[in-house]
Image: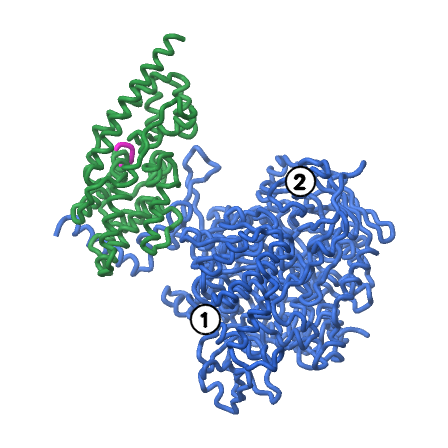
Chain colours: A green, B blue
Amino acid sequence: MSGAPRSGLLRALAAVADGPDAVTPALVAALGLPRAPTAAEHTDLLTFQLHPYASVHLGPEGMLGGEARDRVAGFLRALDVVPPAEPDHLVALLHALADLSDLAAAGAPRADHAATVLLHEHLGAWVGRFLARVLELGAEPLRAWAVLLADVLAAELAARGAPEVLPPALREAPPLSEPEDVSAADWTAELLAPVRTGLVLARADLARAARQLELGARVGERAFTLRALLDQDAAAVLGWLAGEARRQAEDLGMVERTGGVGVAGWWRLRLAGTAERLDALAAVAAARWVEA
Amino acid sequence: MTQLDRLAERVDAARAATEARGETFYQGPSRSHLAMFPPKERWDDWVELDSKAWPQRVEKRFMLVPTTCFNCESACGLLAYVDKDTLQVRKFEGNPESPGSRGRNCAKGPAVQNQITDPDRILHPMRRVGERGAGQWERISWDEALDELALRIRAAITTDRHNEVMYHVGRPGEDGFTERVLAAWGVDGHNSHTNVCSSGGRTGFQFWCGIDRPSPDHANARTILLISSHLETGHYFNPHAQRIIDAKHAGAKVIVMDVRLSNTATHATEWLAPYPGTEPAILLSIVRQIVRDGAYDREYVRRWWNWQQYLAAEHPDRPRTFEAFEEVLRDLYAEYTFEMASAESGVSVAQIRAVHDAVVEAGPRLAVHSWRSAAAGNEGGWQVSRTLFMLCALMGAIAVPGGTYPNAWNKFVARPIHLPHHPAAWNELTYPLEYPIAQNELSFLLPHFVEEGRGILDVYFTRVYNPVWTNPDGFSWIEMLTDHRKVGLHAALTPTWNETAYFADLVLPMGLSSERHDITSYEQYDAQWIAFRQPVLRAARERLGETITDTRQVNPGEVWEENEFWIELSWRIDPDGSLGIRQYFESKARPGEKLGVDEYYGWMFENSVPGLPETAAAEGMTPLEYMRRYGSFEIQKGIGPLHESTVDPAQYATDKRVDEFGRVYSRDPAPAAQNLAPTGAPDPDAEGRRPVGVEIDGEVKRGFPTPSGLLEFYSRTLVDWGWGEHAIPTYIRSHVHPSRMEEGQVPLISTFRLVTQIHTRSANSKWLDELSHSNPLWIHPTHAATLGVITGDLVRVETELGYFVVKAWVTEGIRPGVVACSHHMGRWRLAGHDHTHRLNSTTVALERDGSRWTMRPEQAHGPFESSDPDTSRIWWTDVGVHQNMTFGVHPDPVSGMHCWHQAVRVVRAQDGDRAGDVHVDTDRSRAVYREWLGRTRNARIVSPNGERRPRWLIRPLKPTADAFRIDGPVGRRA
């Protein structure tokens, strides 16, 4: 077994994100995780709460696919690699990084540079935000996995260095639209797109908002739940979201470790801007409520 | 060394240790999410939460047992989840070890669960007790059924009436198994459904390369060109579709020619909707442009086309040089300009040019496919696949990555334990003299042949086949099946009741995907693999230490599997071995005893599948245990261009002769073939030397299994057998070409199907029924407006035999001036029958007045009480119309393919019409039969050698040389 020093480790960490059945006892022991996550813990975190896709975190729609996924696929095609069905899934990205590391170790001419680009643009731009939320929402073995993955990516980044430009997905990221410029449904969806607001909102967050605001949480997709909350008390919910943006802005340590130059600063600014904007909208909504 | 580096080392070491034990350490990224599977080392004890116990988290333990799907030909891998508490199958999912399907299935795979639990399935042998078709049955034992069949078959064989026994197959099982059973009996009685299916497509490929199916390497193609979507959304849907999507991800262009906006067309880069049957005009216009521009692979054409033979025959005055051939080629297709093709097809010049550009850009990475649809719809449809494959032949896109392979190179048929001789008599009911070069049996003409007194069927097996419903002209089939003078004993071997079984004498329950043995191998990428279909409960109980010797011990009721059935029947036909039949069904290990399936497959896996014994041994298993464990085995990957392989000089050391076109012959014996996949079998030379290969640039290459050993641009066979006008790829105007239509007629397309449907067995799959259950008439808004109909209105579709009544579906997804109706629906059961299938079928009354037949729906489909509570929840009533009843038989005079497209008139329904009404006059069907028979060229007139058929063409059960003579034995009473 030859290759780059950490390519096997990257693949093993990928397996943990792949699914509960991919996490074999041998793999858990080798990684030194406290135990294997149960199927329920795995599904709850990586299917229901958080979505380990670049497109979800970097796409203006906050959804699977679209330009954010095409960007990864195009990157792989440029390397003559046939993109897998979900090229922007964290598992696929970690495997691609491992493969490129192996190729670089074998002396392939473009592989080292390609690995750096992949790390900076397609992983580093978002994975810190995702891992931070894993630390908050995940079960013990998944939290341990997140810390380990951040360590490895940070080490890779330190070893490779990163370009002194923001990843394109962040450079080109549109902000939150004005509510009057788009439909209510679209605006709600934008609130759930991390790259527009800086916020990574899970179902658990919306449930927390409902509890704290004493509103009814309707069960459904996140957009449905959030819309229902806004319909009940827009001012309160917008205010809560502004507070949540400030709270999440205080927890950018993972981004600082795994993102390249300027990445953490970008997320901090976006969260701050969102908090300010949502506060203003909350005030308007509250005034309308008073008038009504 | 940092802590992380030490961790990385530990992970690498753990991986090495784990994989050394044959276990999985981590899976690749392709296995993320929906494509993730239980690791194989956990297949003995797989734990899932019981969905029925939700919200409690109750663990269920399963044994996972592989088999292969039987619901289309592609044989995708399935994993049966066998409940360890009850030993019942709880569900089916994909088998990740299957190299073709790679763990993925279409809707038909999981629906096997519906089929095995279908409340109306046949569980015991049944014998008719009233008149045929009256619906009265009694349960009998297998012994009674076997003895009755054996007695009649033995009598036929011992009185030299071998060919009054016929086996008519729908869904094939194991390659060659039943052919060998018939051969052991000396019966040339194999009758397939292929002439209502794929003969047209096969013919075009066979005339080029001697192999009748293509194997497109979709995944590596730069351009994928599909004539119709039928295959990719219906047949090899799953293995091909997933590779087409792989190619799209890699940037390939997908071009689909289809009159309808099919599922595949919605994924296409270019969707062309040509007038039906004009596809060859488009393809030849692309050929013309490529040739004029010199954009083809000149060296490939020079080396591999039989251009010298063409020049010698058609241009003897020209120098026999490649440059002279190129000159001729430039002129040959001069009339096929883009403008001409556009005028003919209705597709714009710009779009045809775009397809041309994509073909040229692809170079050798051009994957093409044509199976049914255009090739199966039109008179001359066989030229669709022939002109399509011509593009590959021009671009050098044959048997190279991303190109199109001959299927026999991507398929493996293992040598069985016994190989009987070929039958000594020719069956004229399947291969009549009028169709000497038909690709397959003229199966759908059987009622007409019998009606004309060409023979009778003393014993007629329909096996997972429903000709009354599937074939055109179904009322003629009913007339034949209900006439005891024509059919002595009809045994329906079927898992489910169907429209043909209603008219049988014996109904014998056969196993479904998880209840039978078969070996299968299909062309799905550039490799050779085999898959093992097996009774999963047999394998499960054997894992628990039981010994199973008869699959009926584990199957539901008395459902049997076929191999054991045929072995048992053969022993009863020849109990003492005096007929020479029994020897082929005896154990080798225990001479004189009956062969069992474990020995049959054990011998095959041990002796005939390269690499399998070694792979199994590495896991401490026998080859049979390995196949029962994993369900499939990839023999070899990356087969490549076999035609380019150099022949061992030892093969032509004795009396070598090279003919003027480079064909090399020798008297040295052929090496034993490992792979029995069907190919053409070129004739020896006049002195009896065997064709060994073909000499190219001084080297003897294996070449193609054609008479010339080359790709046959020019077919000497077609010239010699009376069809010289089609010696090269041409465009034949279809029987539904505008010039052949009467005022007010439009083409009806009936050759498409829905991706979630199984030909005649969907009706017993409740999930598939719920997904799609009716077949409205696709009609363009402009056409609908002229009739004044909207979606849901009833229309009459008038054919040459009668009419059917159907609901209209107004859609822009079809070319204006063409209508279409899926062939899946319109299942029916007869009023008053106790034993029928109730799911997705209408209760009908059949009325007959001389030759006039009427089918009237009496009771709509709806909920009913059964052992399955879901049948009381059926919410739909419209289950479509049985349109095929109203279609006359249209055998293509060359390929023999039934040309499905119909010239019809669509009118508003009349007062009293009901959806599903069918009216037919079978006198008209006989007239249509005679009209098409008149287009044939009889072997008595055109045969160049006094034989019935070119010997080199593929044919099941190829009879002995004597039987090929026109006046040779026919094996039936005078």
Which three-letter amino acid code belongs to the residue tagged 2?
Answer: Thr
Left or right of A108 in this view: B555: right
Circle 1 marks a residue in which chain? B
Quarter holding residue B462? bottom right
Q: Which residues are magenta?
A: A136-140
User: 10 Å neighbourhood of mark 2: few (<14), some, or many (≥20)?
Assistant: some
Quarter holding residue A165? top left
Q: Nearer the viewer, residue B758 or A283?
A: A283
Q: Position of residue B131 (x, y in %)?
A: 81, 53
Q: Is residue A139 magenta?
A: yes
What is the spatial separation of the Cα atoms under label 1 and label 2, in whole angstroms? 49 Å
User: 10 Å neighbourhood of mark 1: few (<14), some, or many (≥20)?
Assistant: some
Report the residue marked by disc 2: B782
| The label number, if any, that marks residue B641 in the structure image | 1
- Kindly give the residue lying farthest to the bottom in the view shown: B655
Q: Is residue B211 magenta?
A: no
Q: Position of residue B938 (x, y in %)?
A: 75, 73
- By secondary structure, the bulk of the magenta-drawn segment is best described as helix
